[in-house]
Image: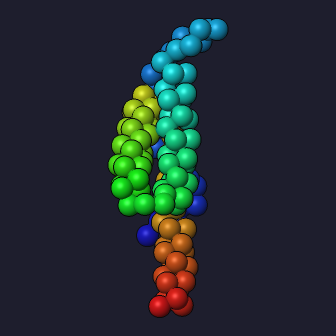
Amino acid sequence: MQNNQENVKIQNQQTDVTNSTQLNDRDYCESMLSTCKRHVDSYAVALNEASNDKWYNELFHIFQETSQMQRKMYNLMFEKGWYTVEAEPQQKIMQTVQKESTKKQQIQ
């Protein structure tokens, strides 16, 4: 196993957009993603506060749809190269797994 402590960036080739005072595709996508994230957060709070099952189920359906839209928007932006992901070194992943496994055993 290679001991590489450097994070590897995972990124697609960036789609160019015009850099002007007018909004471009990236600006619109960022705005939509941000809006979806805020709505998902708000729906999560509303779900915790729902006082009856019918209302809860309706909110949950909307929450799921909004969450899926948020994920699709993120994936689109990743495909366009407007977001990058950093791969964690395997050692750090294993340390986290071990730490969480220990916590799980303690609460069982």
| Image coords of residue 63 (percent x, y) | 42, 48
| Image coords of residue 24 (percent x, y) | 52, 14
Q: How is the image coloured?
A: rainbow
| Image coords of residue 71 (percent x, y) | 41, 42
Q: Residue at x 55, y 79 (%)?
A: 99
Going by the picture, which residue comes out furthest to the right?
21
The answer to whether any part of residue 71 appears in the image is: no
Q: Residue at x 55, y 54 (%)?
A: 45
Q: Is residue 18 above or below residue 4?
A: above
The answer to whether any part of residue 59 appears in the image is: yes
Q: Is residue 26 above or below residue 38?
A: above
Give 107 or 65, whichever is nearer the viewer.
65
Q: How many marks?
A: 0
| Image coords of residue 82 (percent x, y) | 50, 30
Quadrant of the image for the N terminus? bottom left
Quadrant of residue 80 in the image? top left
Q: Is residue 12 above or below residue 93?
A: above
Q: Residue at x 55, y 68 (%)?
A: 92
Q: Residue at x 49, y 37 (%)?
A: 36
Q: Is residue 92 above or below residue 38?
A: below
Give 47 or 20, whichever is nearer the viewer.
47
Give 49 or 103, whichever is nearer the viewer.
49
